[in-house]
Structure formats: structure tokens, C-alpha cells
């Protein structure tokens, strides 16, 4: 009997209500993708749904092959124009979304509807390629619940509360298995990779000119988060190195990769970079150990608090004291880095001559100033640099997010003698050039400084925390020198957010950033609470990797071993008491199951109790009237309980006389019990 019913259900055409059900599911899934995908895909969804509804009302014909192919070609063409091809990850995601949305054009029966829902589950899963945040996970769970209850309805279930109850029950049944698989099953790498978009998280680039980093103050994009194992650095020590710049053409500072350095110096690459889990260039004892939660980035940079000394996974350690990953991050990742919080103590294999190079015959006024300060310092590099920093701290030099534009060949001259207003890159560039002019090896370091400390102890570094300083080679080691500390010491002590918050340019590209409400107490507490929950989610769930799985399983194994050893030490009396307690629990379980079976299985007894309840209210059965006939007779005058009475009568007759499968019989018995309770709740109070 079950097979013909299934075939009949598959052949049944979709009603307008079921089409609405499928369309809402599409909108929920599409909402997860729209922040990262072209908004015109929403128009595709509305067009496909509109055609189907007009076709259902016979105002339009069925979508033929030509129309469907035209729609597919249109979506592919739009994605091609949007992304310049169809082989990138975003374009392929758009193709999947287009197939999902256009499938509604050829969805006419319940079988087609189930195909739409299955494609919806696949598209829903693909949303996590965009983002794995707590908000995305919660929204995906809601969309999955809707798709699941759509499957229940398409399988012949009743729409509304019954379908939701069944869907939530299925989700609850699957939750323990999901948790078990998450905890126990090892993570495996992807079987294939998709071409990633060249998208950088930090906003930094391989080269900078004065003013470039100032543009990052307009954004609140998160670069990474950090938590320290043990002592935390003071604000003046929170210099996060990302990369160094050593080539200056008079306008821009450029970074050379280790392979480029090795080729130009005719040296082996191993002198400039090595893969290891500990730095081969520096054997100092780490001062700080930080766990970094890194944002996805198409570049392999890894920040470190000063010189990186060790990590919990193999990385590329560069001889300039910076760190790179073996591959770019396609999703958020955890990395533990031990570091010195200071500049490298070893020489750069590029040599001091490389770090003295400058364009010839450029910035003559700066050269005259450098020679005068050098003469006044009597050739002492430290006295010279101290005098240079003191000059930056004097008026009319000022620190600003909107400095005058520098153009022309002698930009350092223009800054030092004319505009005298700039951001960290202006001062770092000028300081490095002035150091090189007197023969002091110098380079520019770009990274982040400061960061917002949260109440739970972790730090968040954002784009506006980007910073530039210099390192100079003195007495056999590199030393950090930050001109910003001379011109704007509050920027170092208070952080970028506190120091720059009053500027019109600060967060100009983030008009709706919650950071704008940081002065409003309750709003700032709410923001911090949300960010704390998101951090714990990313660190504990998304960041759950092999090491944590092994540690968790080792702890469980240890507890089981302890329990087993304690069981082995039990006396005979203790063992008998345990056996008696177990037997009592089994007996209670058996009695409970028996009661549930009787409650669910005695449908005749349950209906007779309802008839007795109705009889006390003056609506008892007539002579020779069956229970089903009794309930049907009362239904037209039962008001809100009419539909439930008719449902009970139908289910009772099916249970008593129809050849039902065991699964369907259990389902109808459970529904009958719920409906009997519902009748008493809906029965009119005054009759």
C-alpha cells in the first residue's frame, strides 16, 4: 500500500502554498549569500518565482526550454561580467545560486520540489565558504530548519505546526550524532581547491608611500585577534610586525621577497628564509606567547609581537624578522606564536650597504639638515637619532589623518620643510631616509600597534591600528625607533581608537560601525558582549583542530581509566548496591515505556475518555452511534474545535480498519493523542 501512495504523492502538482514554501526557503538561503554576492541575484529569484505564480494562475505559459536556457545564459553572462570569468570561487558560487533560483521555473510536482530543497541544502552549506561566524551559523540553522520542514510537507505531512514539530524533532535527533562527529572525527584537508579571489584582510600592501596607512584609519575591518598565554605586553610594547620595507625610490618604499633578495645578492635562498617551527635565525628565550585568530587573507603574512621565535606549526621564518605561512588563509585560522617583543638581534643577510641605499641627488635640503645634525652629534649615531626625534616633537610638526598631498621628486624635503604635517608613514619614511643619509642602516617596518583589549582578555586589531615605524642597525643589533612616539605619544599609549576618534576621517568608510557608539555605555557593553561570543565561537568551534581533539579525547580516556580503577576497588556490598540501583533504573524505564505504549496504543480508550468528557457537558453519543460518527456529528457546531474533531474521527477509523504500516500507525497514534488534548483546549467555553 505504501509504494502506490508515494508514487501518487510524487505525481501530485504543487499548489500555490507549496510554491510559497519553496520560495521562502530560497530567500532564506539567498540571504546568507547576498552580503558576499551580486545583489542582482535577488532579481533572478523574484523573476523566477513571479513567472511560476503567474503560470499557476494561467496568465503565463509554462517556461519552455528556450526560456530556461535563455535565463541560464543570462545568469552566466552576468557572472562573467561581474567577475571577469567563471573559474573563481565567487563566480562558481554564483553559478550554484543561479541553478538553485532558476530551478523554480521547472518545478511542477512534489518530486521537483524535493529536488529544489536538496539543492537548497547544498547551497546553504556553501555559504560557509564566505563566512563561519556565529551569526552565519545561527542564520544557517534557521534556513536548514525551514528546508527540513518543507521536506516534511512535500512528503505528505500537514503544513504548519505539525510540520515544524516534526522538523525540530528530526533536528534534535540528529544533534547528538552531529556533536559526536564534530568532537571525534579528525579534520581532513580539502580533496580539491577552488581558485580564491585575491582578497586581503589587513589592507596592507607590499609597498607604501606617505599617506597610504592613513587611509586605513577610515575602516574598522578586523585584521586579527590575539590572546596571551601568561603576561600581557604594555601598550608601548604592542608592536605587531607584519613585513619590512627596505627599497626606496624617492617616492615609495617597496618590499623584496626573500627569493628576490637571494637572486640580487647571489646568495642561497636559505639565508633569507627557512621553513621550521622555530626561528633558525634567533635563539633567544621568548618573552610573550600569543594565540592569534587570523582573518582570511590571500597573502601569507603572519603578525608577530616583535621578532617571531617559535610557532605551533611550520611557518616560513624570514631573515628580516618577519613571519609567513606556508599557504594563504582561505578561512579563519589559529596560530600560536612565541616572540621577543623586540627588533631582531641578528644582521640581515642583505647587508648594511643595502639598507643605506638612496636615490642620488634627491632631497638636498634634507641632506643639508642631516649633515648639520650629524656634525652637532659629533658622529654619534644615538645622539644624531635623538636629535632627529626631538625635531619631530617640536612645533610646527603635527600628526594628522588628512595631510597635504606630496608630489614631485623631493618629497622628503617637502614634508620636513614645507607641510610638516603627516601620518605615521610620513614620519617613518622621513626618519629612515635621514638615517640612511648619514650612513646608518635603516628600514621601514609595517604592521599594527596597540589593539582593543576586551574584558575577557583578548585583543582585537583592526585596520585603523595599522602603523609604520623604523628599525636602525646600531651596535650589532636592530633597534626599533618610532617617530610617532615623538610627535604623538598619545597614539602609542592610548591606541589609535582613543587618539584618532575625534577626527572626521576616522571610520569614514564605516558609517554604521558599532564602534561609533563606544561612548554610549549600554551599546558598547552590547558590542563587547557580541564580539566576545563571536571570538569564543571562532576559537572554540571553528578553531577546533587536531591538537584540541587529541587533548579532549585524552582527558576522556583518563577519566574512564580512573572510573575503571575505582570500580576495581569496590567491595562486594558496594557492587551489590550498584547492581540494585541499575536494576531499579531499568525497572523504571520499563514501566515508563509500558505506560507510553498504553497511552499511545489504546486509541479506543483515549477516545472513550473524550466521549465521557463531552457527555458531562451535554454532548454524549446517541444510541448505537460509533465514536467516529459521534465526533463528526458534533464537529459543525464545535467552533474552533471542528477541524480537530474531524481529524480525530478520520485517524481513529484509519487506525481501526486500515492496513497501515507500523511507522504510519505510530505516527497516527501520536497525532491522535495530541489532537485529543487540542479538542479540550479549543472546545467553546459556553454552549
Image (cartoon, rainbow, N blue to C red):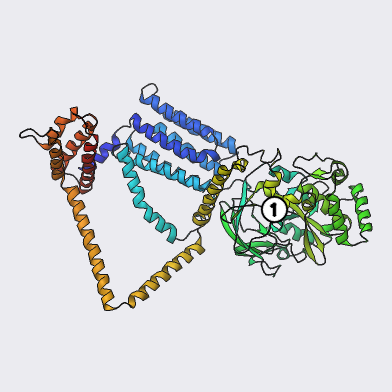
Q: Nearer the viewer, residue 540 or 13?
A: 540
Q: Nearer the viewer, residue 72 or 641?
A: 641
Q: Nearer the viewer, residue 627 or 617?
A: 617
Q: Within the image, what quadrant is residue 81 found in?
A: top right
Q: Residue at x 52, y 42 (%)?
A: 92
Q: Residue at x 82, y 49 (%)?
A: 249
Q: How many marks?
A: 1
Where residue 282 sits in the image (x, y, percent)?
A: 71, 68
Whether residue 421 is situated above or below residue 290 in the rendered picture: above
- Relative to residue 2, is residue 618 drawn left or right? left
Q: Nearer the viewer, residue 531 or 259?
A: 531
Q: Quadrant of the N terminus?
A: top left
Where residue 421 sits in the image (x, y, percent)?
A: 81, 43
Where residue 183 sits in the image (x, y, percent)?
A: 44, 59
SS of the residue under disc 1? strand
Which residue is labeled 1 in the image?
Answer: 449
Q: Within the image, what quadrant is residue 88 found in?
A: top right
Q: Quadrant of the C terminus?
A: top left
The answer to whether residue 203 of the structure is visible from this angle is no
Whether residue 522 is situated above or below residue 555 in the rendered picture: above
Amino acid at each position: 500500500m505504501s509504494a502506490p501512495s508515494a508514487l501518487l504523492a510524487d505525481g501530485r502538482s504543487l499548489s500555490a502554498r507549496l510554491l510559497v514554501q519553496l520560495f521562502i526557503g530560497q530567500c532564506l538561503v539567498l540571504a546568507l549569500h547576498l552580503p558576499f554576492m551580486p545583489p542582482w541575484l535577488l532579481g533572478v529569484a523574484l523573476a523566477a518565482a513571479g513567472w511560476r505564480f503567474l503560470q499557476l494562475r494561467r496568465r503565463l505559459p509554462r517556461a519552455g526550454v528556450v526560456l530556461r536556457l535563455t535565463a541560464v545564459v543570462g545568469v552566466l553572462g552576468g557572472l562573467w561580467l561581474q567577475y571577469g570569468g567563471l573559474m573563481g570561487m565567487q563566480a562558481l558560487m554564483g553559478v550554484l545560486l543561479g541553478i538553485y533560483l532558476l530551478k523554480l521555473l521547472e518545478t511542477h510536482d512534489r518530486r521537483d520540489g524535493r529536488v529544489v530543497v536538496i539543492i537548497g541544502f547544498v547551497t546553504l552549506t556553501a555559504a560557509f565558504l564566505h563566512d563561519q561566524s556565529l551569526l552565519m551559523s545561527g542564520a544557517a540553522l534557521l534556513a536548514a530548519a525551514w528546508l527540513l520542514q518543507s521536506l516534511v510537507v512535500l512528503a505528505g505531512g500537514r503544513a504548519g505546526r505539525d510540520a515544524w514539530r516534526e522538523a525540530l524533532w528530526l533536528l534534535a535527533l540528529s544533534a547528538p550524532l552531529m556533536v559526536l562527529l564534530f568532537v571525534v572525527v579528525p579534520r581532513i584537508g580539502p580533496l580539491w581547491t577552488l581558485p580564491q579571489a585575491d582578497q586581503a584582510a589587513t589592507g596592507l600592501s607590499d609597498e607604501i608611500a606617505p599617506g597610504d596607512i592613513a587611509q586605513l584609519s577610515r575602516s574598522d575591518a578586523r585584521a586579527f585577534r590575539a590572546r596571551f598565554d601568561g603576561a600581557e605586553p604594555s601598550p608601548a610594547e604592542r608592536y605587531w610586525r607584519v613585513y619590512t620595507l627596505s627599497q626606496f625610490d624617492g617616492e615609495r618604499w617597496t618590499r623584496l621577497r626573500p627569493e628576490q633578495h637571494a637572486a640580487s645578492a647571489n646568495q642561497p635562498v636559505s639565508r633569507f628564509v627557512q621553513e621550521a617551527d622555530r626561528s633558525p635565525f634567533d635563539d633567544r628565550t621568548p618573552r610573550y606567547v600569543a594565540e592569534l585568530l587570523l582573518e582570511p587573507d590571500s597573502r601569507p603574512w603572519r603578525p608577530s609581537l616583535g621578532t617571531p621565535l617559535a610557532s605551533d606549526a611550520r611557518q616560513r621564518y624570514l631573515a628580516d624578522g618577519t613571519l609567513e605561512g606556508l599557504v594563504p588563509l582561505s578561512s579563519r585560522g589559529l596560530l600560536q606564536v612565541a616572540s621577543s617583543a623586540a627588533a631582531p638581534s641578528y644582521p640581515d643577510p642583505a647587508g648594511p650597504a643595502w639598507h643605506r641605499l638612496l636615490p642620488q641627488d634627491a632631497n638636498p635640503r634634507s641632506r643639508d639638515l642631516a649633515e648639520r645634525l650629524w656634525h652637532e652629534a659629533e658622529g654619534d649615531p644615538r645622539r644624531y637619532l635623538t636629535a632627529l626625534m626631538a625635531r619631530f616633537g617640536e612645533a610646527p610638526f603635527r600628526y594628522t589623518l588628512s595631510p597635504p598631498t606630496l608630489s614631485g621628486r623631493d618629497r622628503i624635503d617637502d614634508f620636513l620643510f614645507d607641510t610638516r604635517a603627516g601620518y605615521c608613514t610620513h614620519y617613518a619614511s622621513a626618519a629612515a631616509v635621514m638615517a640612511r643619509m648619514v650612513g646608518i642602516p635603516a628600514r621601514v617596518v609595517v604592521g599594527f600597534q596597540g589593539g582593543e583589549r576586551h574584558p575577557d582578555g583578548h585583543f582585537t586589531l583592526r585596520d585603523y591600528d595599522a602603523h609604520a615605524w623604523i628599525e636602525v642597525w646600531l651596535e650589532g643589533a636592530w633597534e626599533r625607533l618610532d617617530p610617532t612616539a615623538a610627535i604623538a605619544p598619545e597614539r602609542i599609549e592610548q591606541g589609535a581608537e582613543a587618539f584618532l576618534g575625534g577626527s572626521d576621517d576616522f571610520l569614514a568608510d564605516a558609517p554604521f560601525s558599532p564602534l561609533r557608539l563606544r561612548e554610549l555605555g549600554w551599546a558598547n557593553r552590547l558590542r563587547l558582549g557580541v564580539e566576545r561570543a563571536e571570538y569564543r565561537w571562532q576559537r572554540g568551534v571553528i578553531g577546533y583542530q587536531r591538537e584540541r581533539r587529541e587533548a579532549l579525547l585524552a582527558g576522556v580516556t583518563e577519566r574512564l581509566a580512573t572510573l575503571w580503577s575505582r570500580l576495581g576497588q569496590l567491595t562486594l556490598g558496594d557492587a551489590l548496591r550498584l547492581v540494585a540501583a541499575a536494576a531499579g533504573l531499568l525497572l523504571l524505564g520499563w514501566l515508563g515505556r509500558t505506560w507510553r505504549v498504553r497511552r499511545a496504543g489504546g486509541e479506543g480508550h483515549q477516545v472513550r475518555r473524550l466521549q465521557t468528557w463531552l457527555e458531562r457537558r451535554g454532548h454524549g453519543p446517541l444510541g448505537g452511534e460509533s465514536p467516529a460518527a459521534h465526533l463528526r456529528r458534533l464537529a459543525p457546531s464545535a467552533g474552533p474545535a471542528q477541524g480537530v474533531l474531524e481529524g480525530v474521527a478520520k485517524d481513529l477509523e484509519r487506525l481501526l480498519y486500515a492496513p497501515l504500516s507500523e511507522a504510519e500507525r505510530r505516527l497516527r497514534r501520536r497525532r491522535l493523542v495530541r489532537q485529543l488534548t487540542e479538542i479540550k483546549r479549543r472546545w467553546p467555553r459556553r454552549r
